[in-house]
Amino acid sequence: MVKAVFFDLYETLITEWKDGRKKAKYSIEPLGLDKGIFKAEWDLRRELRMNGTFPDHQSVLRDILDSQGITPNVEAIEYVHLERLSAKSIPFQEIDSQVIELLQTLKSNGLKLCLISNAAPEEVDAWETSELPDYFDEVIFSYEARVAKPQKEIYQLACKKVGVTPEESIFIGDGGSDELEGATEAGMTALQATWFLPSVISERITGYPKLKKPHDLLLHESIKSNTVY
C-alpha cells in the first residue's frame, strides 16, 4: 500500500518555461567572461553545486573567474547573483492550479508528501514564500543533504524522514538527472511527470509510465485505491 508520494521540483511542481521560452533570464555580462566559456565552466561544476560543495552561488562565480585568471569583482558577482535570484523566483510565483489541486487531494487522503530536489541554494530561495511548503511533510534539497539524485542515498534519506519504506513510496519527476532510474534502484515506484515537457523531450525517456497531467496520478493503479474524491 502506498503511504507516501515523493516529488521532484523543477519541471514537475514548477516550470521555468512558457510557450517554449524561459520565463526569466539573467545576464552574466558584468563578470567580463565569454558566455560560451562561462556555460562550459558552469556545467563542469554542476555536481559540486548540487551536493553543497560550493556553499553558495557567489562562491561558484568566484571559482569560475579564478579558473580563467580573472580577478573576481565583488560588485559584479553580487549583481549577477541578485539577477539569478530574481529569475529563479519567477516559477514559484506562477504555480499551476492543477498541481495545487493534486497536492491538496493527496494530502486530504492521508498520504505523506515529500520533496526531493537537486538544487543549489539560490535556486530554491523562493520556496518558503510560495504556496508549496504547506503541503509537504518533509523537504530534501540536495545541497543541504550533501547528496544528489540519482544517488540512492538521497531517496533513502527521504524515506527515513517520512517514516516509510521505498516499497510504500511513489516518486514523481520529469526524469532529469536520471532521477527515475535512481528512484527505481532505491526500491520506489517511479512515474514520469510530462505535463510541463514538450513531447520531443519527454519521449527521450522510456520505461516509465507517463503522466500527461497532474490528475493522472490519481488514476494510476498504484495510488487509486488510496484516493477518495
Image (spheres, rainbow, N blue to C red):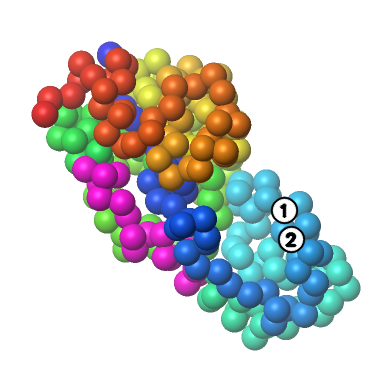
Q: Residue at x 26, y 23 (%)?
A: 219
Q: Is residue 50 visible?
A: yes
Residue 91 occupies quadrant: bottom left
Q: Position of residue 40 (x, y in %)?
A: 78, 57
Q: Residues within 10 Å of mark 1 (few under 14, many from 20)?
A: few
Q: Residue at x 76, y 52 (%)?
A: 44
Q: Nearer the viewer, residue 182 or 87?
A: 87
Left or right position of 14 against 4: right
Q: Which structural element holds mark 1?
A: helix
Looking at the rendering, in which quadrant would you find the C terminus?
A: top left
Looking at the image, is 24 positioned above or below residue 30?
A: above
Left or right position of 48 against 161: right
| Residue 97 colored in magenta in the image | yes
The numbered disc on residue 53 is none
Q: Position of residue 197 (x, y in %)?
A: 48, 43
Q: Which residues are magenta?
A: 85-101
Q: Residue furthest left?
A: 229
| Pointers 2 and 1 in contact (C-beta within 8 Å) | yes
Number of callouts? 2
Q: Which structural element holds mark 2?
A: helix
Q: Residue at x 48, y 17 (%)?
A: 187
Q: Position of residue 175 (x, y in %)?
A: 53, 34
The numbered disc on residue 43 is 1
Q: Nearer the viewer, residue 25 or 172?
A: 25
Q: Is residue 121 visible?
A: no
Looking at the image, is 188 positioned above or below residue 94?
A: above
Q: Residues within 10 Å of mark 2 (few under 14, many from 20)?
A: some
Distance between the Cα atoms at labels 2 and 1? 6 Å
The numbered disc on residue 39 is 2
Q: Residue at x 56, y 23 (%)?
A: 206
Q: Position of residue 147 (x, y in %)?
A: 58, 40
Q: Residue furthest bottom?
A: 75
